């Protein structure tokens, strides 16, 4: 951390101290170890096409740096926000042009086809005073250069400051979008990791169900199981297949969502070595903590919008004041007729404009600007309220998620032990098929609940940390 920067909370420092560990572990992440127990009796080997995993995607994300690089290069939202910055800079330059000198040049070429009759003022050949006509075909050329500058224009000067404030709003909005897109990317990766795990758990559940079915069929052949036991075992297999179909589809959708998050239409996955803790350690690699909500980019941008709305109202009031400008024109013209000479002029002008009455348009604009300023202030207050409550909820959600994860872990361990004992009792003829199917379904659901709880914990921690963070590249 650089000197002079405010110290962050301990959990934030712990997150920042990590590195992304996508490709460091040689083996896939395994579910949490089940409680120690005595060895299960051997089970029959089973084969089934659905036990084959979902085909991997053609593209993988190997590190957080790669994911972030793709996000910044291909995100259409960031691209649009950057274009908003460019437009705001262009508007600022346009506002500045209103008070800078202007220089323009013009030229005119006129060809006379027919000259109307005119009465001669001198004696003519017949001395009768008859009307004579001049011949057509003459050409007239003129050129001028005009320079002008605004000397006093309070409204235009004020608009320059408003345009520059608009640039600040665009940049702050871009910074806030960087924060939210980083959070979305981390969530997409975490969801993909969880979906991979749930899909694998579904295959483990299906394999266990098939083993139970094979065990029940073996017992039927020895006369220790009934047809009802077979039906229940097959029902358990069907339930496991249904869960696996849903989890596989969720996995495919998570890959597609991750692809969209980094700007691709093709599905993208993460390496099998990825775990949720590595995501948590790496998601804020390019972010830094901020002291409070008032320094968060979206709050700063909304505050700037309030300032701009008030400036708009002031600009309407400044429109009632007179303006003063100066101009100078240099022009020349000549005709190609005989004995014609060029006619050159140069003038200087001072123009005073006093607005008197425009039908009440400015009064209407003033009331509209005042209402817009009040709306902006209300939006800022609403954002502060929602953000304050959101911050409290984000902090509390970490504790809730940790407790939920602890409960899910305990429930999974108990479900595992119940299933183990039930299988052991059934193999020795002391349990029923109903107990076997019930314990198996409970174990599958407990495994899924634990995976979802772990995902919820990571998301809660990310939300809590990103609520008070700035993820802008420009430091």
Image (cartoon, rainbow, N blue to C red):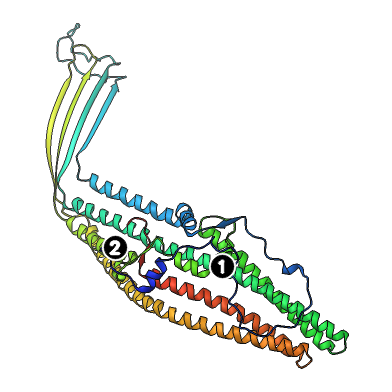
Where is residue 350, by image quadrant? top left
Judging by the rendered image, the residue that carries numbered circle 1 is: 193
Question: How many angstroms separate mark 1 from mark 2 (CA)?
Answer: 40 Å
Number of the front mark, 1 or 2? 1
Determine whether 315 is above or below 426 in the image.
above
Task: Look at the numbered disc 2 and give the secondary structure of its residue.
Answer: helix
Question: x%, y% of residue 290?
Answer: 31, 67
Mark 2, residue position:
305
Quarter of the rendering containing residue 417: bottom right
Q: Going by the image, does 442 lie left or right of 134?
A: right
Mark 1 element type: helix
Q: Is residue 453 left or right of residue 372?
A: right
> Residue 393, position in %: x, y?
40, 79
Query: Is the residue marked by circle 1 packed among few (<14), some (14-19), or many (20+) residues within 10 Å?
Result: many
Screen quadrant of the N terminus: bottom left
Quarter containing the C terminus: bottom left
Relative depth, front residue between 315 and 245 = 245
């Amino acid at each position: 951390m650089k000197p002079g920067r405010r110290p962050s909370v301990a959990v934030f420092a712990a997150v920042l101290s990590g590195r992304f560990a996508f490709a460091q572990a040689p083996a896939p992440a395994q579910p949490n170890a089940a409680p120690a127990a005595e060895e299960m009796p051997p089970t029959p080997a089973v084969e089934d096409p659905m036990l084959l995993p979902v085909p991997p995607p053609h593209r993988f994300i190997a590190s957080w740096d790669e994911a972030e690089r793709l996000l910044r290069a291909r995100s259409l939202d960031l691209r649009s926000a950057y274009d908003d910055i460019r437009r705001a800079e262009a508007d600022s330059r346009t506002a500045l042009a209103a008070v800078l000198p202007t220089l323009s040049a013009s030229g005119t070429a006129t060809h006379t086809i027919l000259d109307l009759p005119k009465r001669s003022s001198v004696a003519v050949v017949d001395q009768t005073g008859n009307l004579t006509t001049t011949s057509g075909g003459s050409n007239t050329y003129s050129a001028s250069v005009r320079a002008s500058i605004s000397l006093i224009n309070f409204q235009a000067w004020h608009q320059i400051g408003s345009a520059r404030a608009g640039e600040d709003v665009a940049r702050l909005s871009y910074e806030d979008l960087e924060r939210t897109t980083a959070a979305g990317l981390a969530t997409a990766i975490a969801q993909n990791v969880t979906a991979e795990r749930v899909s694998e758990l579904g295959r483990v559940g299906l394999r266990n169900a098939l083993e139970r079915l094979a065990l029940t069929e073996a017992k039927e052949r020895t006369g220790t199981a009934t047809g009802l036991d077979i039906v229940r075992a097959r029902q358990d297999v069907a339930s496991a297949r249904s869960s696996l179909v849903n989890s596989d589809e969720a996995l495919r959708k998570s890959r597609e969502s991750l692809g969209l998050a980094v700007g691709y239409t093709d599905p993208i996955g993460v390496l099998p070595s990825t775990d949720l803790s590595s995501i948590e350690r790496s998601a804020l690699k390019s972010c830094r903590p901020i002291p409070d909500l008032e320094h968060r980019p979206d709050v700063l941008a909304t505050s700037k919008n309030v300032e701009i709305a008030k400036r708009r109202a002031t600009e309407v009031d400044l429109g009632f004041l007179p303006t003063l400008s100066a101009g100078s024109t240099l022009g020349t013209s000549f005709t190609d007729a005989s004995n014609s000479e060029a006619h050159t002029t140069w003038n200087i002008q001072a123009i005073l404009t006093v607005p008197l009455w425009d039908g009440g348009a400015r009064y209407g604009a003033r009331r509209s600007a005042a209402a817009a300023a009040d709306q902006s202030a209300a939006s800022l207050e609403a954002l502060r309220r929602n953000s304050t409550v959101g911050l409290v909820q984000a902090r509390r959600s970490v504790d809730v998620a940790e407790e939920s994860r602890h409960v899910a872990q305990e429930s999974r361990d108990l479900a595992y032990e119940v299933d183990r004992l039930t299988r052991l009792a059934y193999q020795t003829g002391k349990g029923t098929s109903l107990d076997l199917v019930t314990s198996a379904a409970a174990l599958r659901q407990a495994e899924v609940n634990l995976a979802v709880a772990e995902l919820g914990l990571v998301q809660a921690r990310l939300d809590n940390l990103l609520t008070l963070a700035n993820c802008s590249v420009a430091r």
